[in-house]
Image (spheres, helix red, strand yellow):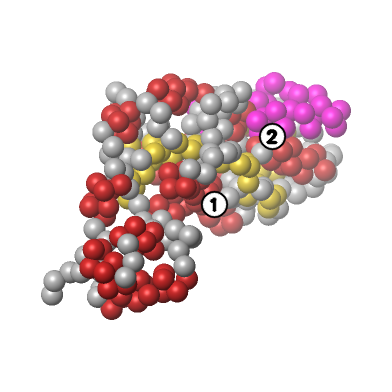
């Protein structure tokens, strides 16, 4: 059966090709009666738009690039990042675009944009050491939205959460439970973790608790392996800590394992809190107290912003999503001299 063309749909509906195109692209400024007429003809003739023809006619690739500036093994083994990518992928598909994953090598993301192979980018959770990527995107004028902010760097649009406040919420939770010897484990090269640390630091100061530098440990990654090794070292230092603030749930997973291997009870001897509320957090042993940040929604919102800019020239503006403290069985009241 011969496929109907946009020209033929326009003739049957007695409208212009432009009107048919606007109906296909779900643009708002089409008379409802006309829209219904065009959609009925499309349905009756089983019309399917040729995505590549559409891209050529609009001088667009109809493709969104996802820049992942980390090792694939690190990203795909962390449920938080997987949730962000699920959000990106879902929204890209809903809006009728294709998704291209890009690991930045020799500025290949610049070439992809200048060759019109992508229309714009989602930049996955950049850190301070990824500013060169942002500067390169700016050089070729490639629109992009990041799923994390970089502190004091203004030339970017991002979707993030208030990590400073999240750090405060968790530390206040532990201090309210009577804890004073609270260890912190996290990465300082990533703005999110640095902000969480400053929230932790400020609450201790406000509550009259001295910051013990020996309890602040910098991790090389947000992996469970890193949390496990750091926690083993902390436990060997005889520092009488009663709580641990791990700056990610994956770090917390390793922390829990190291504590349990020593035969120490969680939470009656040491409370543990994490950050992210990955799906696994509620099934950890014990279930993990953490900050819930909307990873999936981050991906969706970042993609919406980018595509809205590409299609309707809506301005690219950053946004902050809400956080929630999720209290579970990994944290409890500290009793002195028990």
Q: Position of residue 171 (x, y in %)?
A: 74, 38
> Is residue 56 magenta-colored?
no
- When the figure is inspected, residue 280 is found, relative to residue 136, above or below; the finding is below
Taking depth in this image into account, of 318 and 17 the one nearest to the observer is 17
Q: Quadrant of residue 103?
A: top left
> Is residue 208 magenta-colored?
yes
Return the mark for residue 164.
2
| Rendered-image quadrant of the C terminus | top right
Report the side of 72 relative to 3 (left or right). Answer: right
Report the side of 176 relative to 131 (left or right). Answer: right
| Badge 2 density bin: few <14, some 14–19, many ≥20, Cα 10 Å | some
Q: Nearer the viewer, mark 2 or mark 1?
A: 1
Q: Secondary structure at mark 1?
A: helix
Report the side of 211 relative to 223 (left or right). Answer: right
Q: Position of residue 87 (x, y in %)?
A: 47, 52
Residue denoted by label 1: 297
Report the side of 77 relative to 289 (left or right). Answer: left
Q: CA distance from mark 2 to mark 1?
A: 19 Å
Q: Position of residue 182 (x, y in %)?
A: 72, 33
**Where are the magenta residues, as a range?**
195-223
Q: Quadrant of residue 117?
A: top left
Taking depth in this image into account, of 297 and 138 the one nearest to the observer is 138
Residue at 68% x, 50% y: name it. 324
């Amino acid at each position: 059966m011969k496929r109907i063309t946009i020209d033929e749909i326009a003739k049957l509906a007695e409208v212009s090709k432009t009107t048919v195109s606007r109906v296909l692209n779900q643009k708002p400024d089409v008379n409802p009666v006309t829209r219904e007429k065009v959609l009925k003809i499309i349905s009756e003739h089983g019309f399917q738009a040729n995505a590549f023809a559409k891209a050529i006619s609009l001088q667009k690739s109809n493709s969104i690039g996802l820049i992942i500036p980390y090792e694939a093994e690190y990203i795909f083994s962390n449920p938080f990042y997987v949730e962000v990518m699920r959000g990106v992928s879902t929204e890209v598909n809903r809006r009728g675009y294709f998704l291209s994953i890009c690991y930045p090598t020799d500025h290949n993301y610049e070439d992809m944009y200048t060759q019109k192979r992508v229309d714009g980018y989602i930049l996955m959770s950049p850190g301070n050491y990824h500013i060169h990527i942002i500067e390169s995107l700016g050089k070729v004028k490639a629109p992009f939205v990041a799923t994390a902010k970089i502190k004091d760097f203004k030339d970017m649009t991002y979707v993030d959460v208030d990590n400073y406040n999240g750090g405060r919420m968790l530390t206040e939770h532990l201090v309210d439970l009577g804890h004073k010897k609270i260890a912190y484990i996290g990465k300082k090269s990533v703005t999110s973790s640095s902000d969480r640390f400053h929230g932790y630091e400020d609450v201790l100061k406000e509550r009259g608790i001295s910051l013990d530098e020996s309890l602040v440990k910098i991790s090389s990654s947000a992996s469970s392996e890193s949390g496990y090794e750091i926690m083993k070292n902390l436990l060997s230092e005889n520092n009488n800590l009663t709580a641990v603030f791990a700056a990610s749930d994956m770090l917390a997973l390793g922390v829990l394992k190291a504590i349990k291997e020593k035969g120490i009870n969680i939470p009656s001897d040491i409370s543990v809190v994490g950050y992210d509320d990955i799906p696994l957090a509620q099934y950890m042993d014990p279930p993990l107290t953490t900050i819930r940040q909307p990873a999936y929604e981050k991906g969706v919102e970042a993609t919406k912003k980018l595509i809205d800019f590409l299609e309707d020239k809506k301005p690219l503006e950053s946004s902050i999503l809400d956080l929630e403290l999720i209290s579970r069985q990994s944290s409890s009241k500290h009793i002195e001299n028990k």
